[in-house]
Image: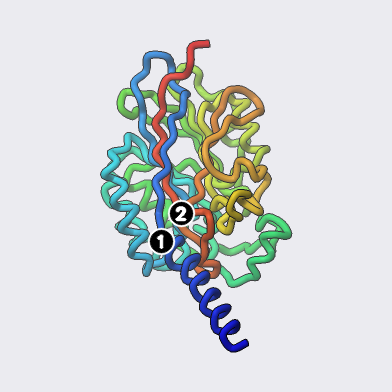
Amino acid sequence: MRTLITATAALGAAGAGYVTVIERNWFALRQHEVPVLRPGASPLRILHISDTHLTPGRKRLMAWVRALDDLDPDLVINTGDSIAHPQAVGPLLDALGPLLDRPGAFVLGSNDMFAPEPHNPARYLIGASSHWRVRKEPDLPWEKLRDDLTAAGWLDLNNHRGRLTVAGHDIALAGVHDSHVKRDRYEQIAGPADPAADLRIGVTHSPEPRLLDQFAADGYDLLLAGHTHGGQLCLPFYGALVTNCGIERERVSGLHRHPVGGRAWLHVSAGLGTSPYAPARFACRPEASLLTLVPREPS
Ligand SMILES: [Fe+2]
């Protein structure tokens, strides 16, 4: 009996160590080809990062993000939930480092505004976090985060449109603030995306179907989102248990066609971090993604 108890405790400790230390720091680079450019266009490489939930002590995460510059992306898109600590903006900027010298754009997530709180992880199984108590007064330095990223030259897409010329491609962009704290204002960016642009990109923290449908109907070619953490704690051979938003389990992360309103592709990042109060990942490695945009098949 004592042997059984000892073995069970050892197995439990090993499992806890795996999900909180090993897999949580086992960063993965995902790569996808996305056929959204005009026939004959030269490829365009987008680095998609999301959900770093950075606290100043996460040195491995910071070093890994910094090294992403070696990929030489043409454009960087950050889909939010970047910080999880009042002193995290400086470390985030250090981690982004040379990436900030590249063309970039971002939206914010609710966790950029509100400090993480302890809560029962089982709540995620019951319903999306948007249904939890809504806090009114932000207590994280989201304005500094926004201003510092903007000062570095990145486009603020929180309920804004923008335009970038990147590697010879004229790109029309639009994004919304986080719907989970009811700050999304699609009406402020609504309307057809410029058909004269070489590419149209829609950005949202959370991949809510109603927002994705609107972006797609307005003619955006590529939709980028984060928020889901890919399910964070997944079952092998089954995948995510929950998406923490309206999107279906099958599109909790990765590249998929959006089935409504046109020809859009959707890429959802499983993100790089976790809440400090839920520091675990299983069967769902933290990730960043390099999307190589290539010409679409002639129709
Ligand atoms: Fe997140």
297 lies left or right of 29? right
Going by the numbered disc 1, the residue's amino acid type is: Asn
Q: Is residue 192 visible?
A: yes
Instruction: Return the x and y of residue 295 as percentages of the image width and height.
Output: 42, 19
Question: Disc 2, disc 1: CB below 8 Å?
Answer: yes
Q: Nearer the viewer, residue 96 or 140?
A: 96
Tag 2: amino acid: Pro
Q: Earlier in the sequence, mark 2 or mark 1?
A: 1
Binning the other alpha carbons within 10 Å of mark 1 as few (below 14), some (14 to 19) or many (20 upward) gives many
Q: Position of residue 191 (x, y in %)?
A: 59, 26
Residue toward you, 39 or 206: 39
Q: Position of residue 11 (x, y in %)?
A: 53, 74
Residue hosting label 2:
286
Q: Which residue is mark 1?
A: 25
Q: Is residue 139 visible?
A: no
Identified at 37% across, 14% down, the residue is 40
CA distance for labels 2 and 1: 7 Å
Residue 153, relative to residue 198: is it above or below?
A: below
Name the residue located 45 percent from the left edge and 67 percent from the top edge: 85
87 in relation to 264, above or below: below
- Under circle 1, the secondary element is helix
Q: Secondary structure at mark 2?
A: loop
Vertical comparison of 6 with 37: above or below: below
